[in-house]
Amino acid sequence: MYSLNARVPRSVRTVVEALQRDLPDGCRPRDRLTLVVKRVGEDETDHRELAERARTALAGEPACNARLGRLGAFDADGTPVVHLRVESPGLRALHHRLCRAFDPVPAIEGEAYVPHVTLGRGGDWSAVEALCERDVEPVEWTVSDLLLWSNRWREPVASLALGR
């Protein structure tokens, strides 16, 4: 499995690390912070081919602004997933453009896509909901490239610049 991810800048990591210290009991912090823009290449595929398809799909797409939004949680098989929403019409536009080149994953992509950074998984729902009432520092940044991430190798295998 591969995905196209936006970089998570240090300023966002700082906010996430502070919030992770307050995750409720039983909520396991996420060690690798990601901002998935689109999942691609379900099966083992040549990453060079995927990178080229993505470059073609993204041709002419400009860099875009992103801003941390509110805390939230969604249900993943009965388990809460705590996340920080990322407000970015540009990331949504990139996602929808990529959905025309790569089939959307049902129930989480396409119209259901919510840009976010996951903080942790698990814990008691009421404790998670209480945490989600906190205010978050409104960090802003520019997304100027996407990384083609290999789940198998757990590292980026290509970088795709936006605005070129």
Image (cartoon, grey):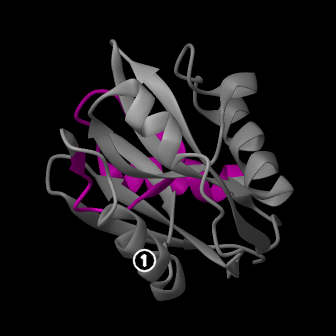
Q: Which image quarter is the C terminus in?
A: bottom right
Percent coordinates x, y for residue 67 in the rendering: 73, 69
Figure check: 148 above or below 16: above
User: From this viewpoint, is residue 40 visible?
Assistant: no
Q: Is residue 114 above or below residue 88?
A: above
In the picture as drawn, the residue positioned furthest to the bottom comes out as 10
**Residue found 79% across the figure and 73% down from its top:** 65
Mark 1: which secondary structure? helix
Dot 1 alpha-carbon crowd within 10 angstroms: few under 14, some 14 to 19, many 20 or more? few
Please give left or right for residue 131 compared with residue 25 in the image.
Answer: right
Q: At which x and y percent is residue 120?
A: 32, 47
131 horizontally vs 68: left or right? left
> In the image, what residue occupies the spot 52% across and 56% down?
52
**Residue at horizontal 66%, vertical 33%?**
113
**x then y, percent, for residue 158:** 39, 68
Write down the residue under mark 1. 13
Range covered by the magenta-colored residues: 28-57
Does residue 150 appear in this view?
A: yes
Q: Nearer the viewer, residue 19 or 36?
A: 19
Please identify the quarter of the rendering in which residue 60 is found. bottom right
Q: What residue is rendered at 35% in x and 73% in y?
A: 17
Q: Please state which amino acid type lies under the numbered disc 1.
A: Arg
Q: In terms of image quadrants, where is residue 155? A: bottom left
Front residue of this view, candidates 77 and 131 = 131
In the image, taking residue 125 as reference, residue 89 lies left or right, namely right
User: Residue furthest toward the left?
Assistant: 153
Q: Indicate the position of residue 36 as horizontal and vertical percent values.
A: 50, 50
